[in-house]
Amino acid sequence: MIRVGLSILFVIGLGSEVKAQVQLSNVTAAHVEHIAAIPERSGILVDIRNSGQRAITAFFVEFFQSGANGESIPCGGRGADMIDWSDPMPGRNIYVHLRRNWILPGGMGSIDGYPQCAGTATSLERVSVQLSLVMFDDGTGEGDRSRIESTLLLRQQARNERLKWLPRFTALRDAQDPKASAQSLYQDLVDATRSAEIDPHQASRQGMAKPVRDELRQLALDITEIAAHNGRLQQNEFIAWRITDLEQRTARLVQGAGKTDVSPK
């Protein structure tokens, strides 16, 4: 790789018998199937089963702790959005980005989390887990409406920025002078980031635009350096694949961003 609910009582081991409960969830397409403690890291491993008919492209689990009076204390959460992850390069099994690992129908995904409870010490024996979000490849989802909207907002920010620059990357394939074209693209990405950061209001609202530009800037730099030595990009199989990967990931991102844009709060 380059860079890079059902209400069930489970028993997890922490030297003595410890009980952790899975809270009821309004997610119907998946459920928490198993949890296990990671005592050496003060964490919990959560397994999620896709019991629906569509691949899950994102999910989020939340942690809670029962207080002395039975109240529910938030303890954070963790999730993953895999809509923009990579398929392997044919014949070489190289991943340009994180490996695309959507949870297929009947399949299972896992994530480890590290509960940190608000205003009180975290006690794993009183931590419960809730699956609060799943998303599908068409931008629809189940669970907490605010989490669905925030996931879509981030996807849409990434989509909008990617679509600004993608045509210039694909045009590099047939550029007469790919080094000069890639160098110009790199400079424009640098200037776009600098311009966005001059205005504090604009900078605070960049969201996913900045990390998208950062990734694209690095790709433009790599293409510039390769083109300086090898000429046309078709002569470098890996660089050509990175542009193809960018196209494929963008197509999935466009579909997964939904049909209606979310307004930033």
Image (tube, rainbow, N blue to C red):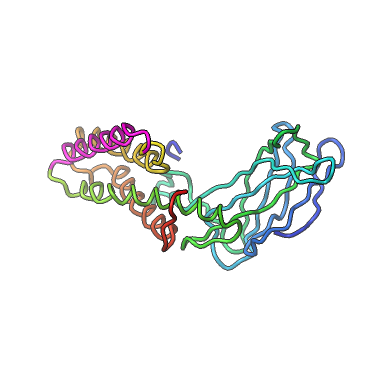
Identify whether 253 is placed above or below 201.
below
Q: Residue 241 in magenta?
A: no
Q: Nearer the viewer, residue 92 or 29?
A: 29
Q: Is residue 257 above or below residue 92?
A: below
Magenta stretch: includes residue 194: yes
Question: What main secondary structure does the magenta stretch of the protein show?
Answer: helix
The residue drawn where x is 65% and y is 58% is 49
Which residue appears farthest toward the bottom when viewing the image? 53
Q: Position of residue 37 (x, y in %)?
A: 74, 40
- Pick whichever, 148 or 103, lies toward us: 148
> Looking at the image, which residue is at 52% across and 60% down?
136
Along the line of sight, the residue nearer the viewer: 211 or 112: 211
Across and down, in percent, residue 29 comes to 62, 64
Residue 215 position by quadrant: top left
Q: Which residues are magenta?
A: 177-201
Residue at the location (41% across, 43% down)? 208
